[in-house]
């Protein structure tokens, strides 16, 4: 456990941009926004892996109500795309249907007034060989790169003028061949980043520290996921209850044009994060 001791200036900036993630113990969009209002959060990130928030459940009129309610209460809506998708899958049906799902999320986000969609690339498929795991993307790197480039290009073109797409550091994000592709789209000003500090602290490949990469692209970060762990697994603990040095990271993050989100579950643990920050 690391004691968090931040300056009054940093604490003040955190208060101005902090939010929480709504997941499994939230009744609906409106109650999630009410929880944010009650606890002085500025934003809510809705995790669309949760059936309650599936876009197809909401009519045009219901979407307008959500947008109006969030605007009227000055609460920013952020979205986290479903985690089942894989935009580099070697199965064309999986890849194309993942794109289809993400396009629905883009339309939904636009309709309800969301500002940013955080999404994952997908998870690599491992093959066991001689006691080791070999990933398909390592066996067929050219096809992997081609699939990823095609998918990102299609999604970013579709989202243009509607909403920001922000890629999170999870799964294959940390692989060198992935980074080369990501950098192309970052440099073209189409793609943005979600820096998950919990994933950043994991000690196993391909999650290990991405500080050098993210420091190079601080100007492209639009969301930050804040949670804690001890490095050996993705625990999603309240910040201050693991070993991450938030005294180092938070003074940097508060000065970015980025939303800060406590990614802890259930939602009540976000209040523990506030307490541990002395807010």
Image (spheres, rainbow, N blue to C red):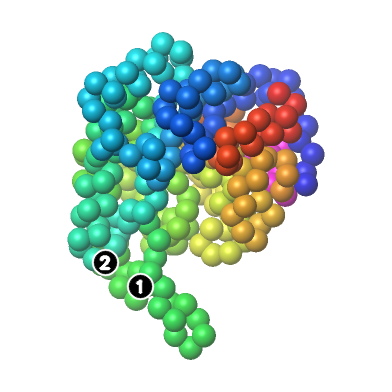
| Label number found at residue 136 | 1
Residue depicted at x 41% and y 27%? 29
Whole-angstrom CA distance, mark 1 to mark 2, is 9 Å
Residue depicted at x 57% and y 58%? 208
Please give the count of numbered marks on the rendered protein: 2
For this orientation, the residue located farthest to the bottom is 130
Q: Which residues are magenta?
A: 243-250
Q: Are marks 1 and 2 in contact (CB under 8 Å)?
A: yes
Main secondary-structure element of the magenta-colored stretch: helix
Is 29 left or right of 250, judged from the image as shown?
Answer: left
Give yes or no for residue 249 being in the magenta stretch.
yes
Is 59 left or right of 233, judged from the image as shown?
Answer: left
Q: Residues within 10 Å of mark 2 (few under 14, many from 20)?
A: some
Residue 52: image location, x then y, percent:
39, 38
Based on the displayed image, in which of its 4 quarters is residue 266 positioned?
top right
For this orientation, the residue located farthest to the front is 27
Residue 21: image location, x then y, percent:
51, 35
Residue depicted at x 40% and y 78%? 127
User: Compared with residue 2, is residue 138 higher up or lower down, i.e. above or below?
Assistant: below
Residue depicted at x 37% and y 42%? 51
The quarter of the rendered structure image containing the C terminus is top right
User: Compared with residue 73, is residue 203 higher up or lower down, i.e. above or below?
Assistant: below
Q: Residues within 10 Å of mark 1 (few under 14, many from 20)?
A: some
Residue 91: image location, x then y, percent:
24, 66
- Residue 87 or 84: which is nearer the viewer? 84
Give yes or no for residue 36 being in the magenta stretch.
no
Can residue 21 be spotted in the picture?
A: yes
Q: Please name the residue that numbered disc 2 is placed on.
A: 90
Is 21 left or right of 7, judged from the image as shown?
Answer: left
Can residue 117 be spotted in the picture?
A: no
Q: Secondary structure at mark 2?
A: loop
């Amino acid at each position: 456990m690391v004691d968090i001791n931040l300056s009054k200036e940093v604490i003040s900036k955190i208060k101005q941009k902090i939010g929480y993630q709504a997941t499994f113990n939230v009744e609906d969009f409106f109650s999630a926004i009410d929880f944010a209002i009650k606890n002085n959060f500025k934003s809510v990130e809705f995790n669309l892996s949760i059936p309650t928030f599936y876009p197809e459940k909401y009519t045009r009129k219901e979407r307008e109500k959500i947008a109006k309610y969030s605007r009227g209460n000055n609460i920013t809506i952020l979205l986290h795309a479903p985690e089942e998708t894989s935009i580099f899958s070697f199965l064309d049906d999986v890849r194309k249907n993942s794109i289809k799902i993400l396009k629905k999320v883009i339309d939904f986000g636009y309709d309800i007034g969301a500002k940013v969609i955080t999404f994952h690339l997908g998870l690599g498929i491992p093959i066991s060989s001689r006691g080791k795991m070999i990933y398909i993307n390592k066996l067929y790197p050219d096809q992997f790169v081609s699939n990823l480039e095609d998918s990102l290009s299609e999604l970013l073109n579709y989202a243009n003028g509607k909403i920001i797409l922000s890629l999170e550091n999870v799964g294959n994000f940390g692989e060198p061949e992935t980074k080369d592709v990501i950098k192309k789209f970052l440099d073209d000003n189409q793609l943005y980043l979600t820096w998950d500090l919990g994933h950043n602290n994991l000690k196993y490949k391909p999650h290990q520290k991405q500080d050098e990469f993210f420091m190079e692209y601080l100007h492209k970060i639009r969301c930050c996921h804040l949670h804690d762990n001890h490095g050996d697994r993705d625990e999603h603990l309240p910040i201050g209850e693991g070993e991450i040095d938030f005294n180092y990271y938070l003074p940097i993050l508060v000065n970015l044009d980025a939303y800060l989100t406590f990614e802890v579950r259930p939602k009540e643990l976000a209040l523990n994060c506030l307490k541990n920050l002395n807010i």
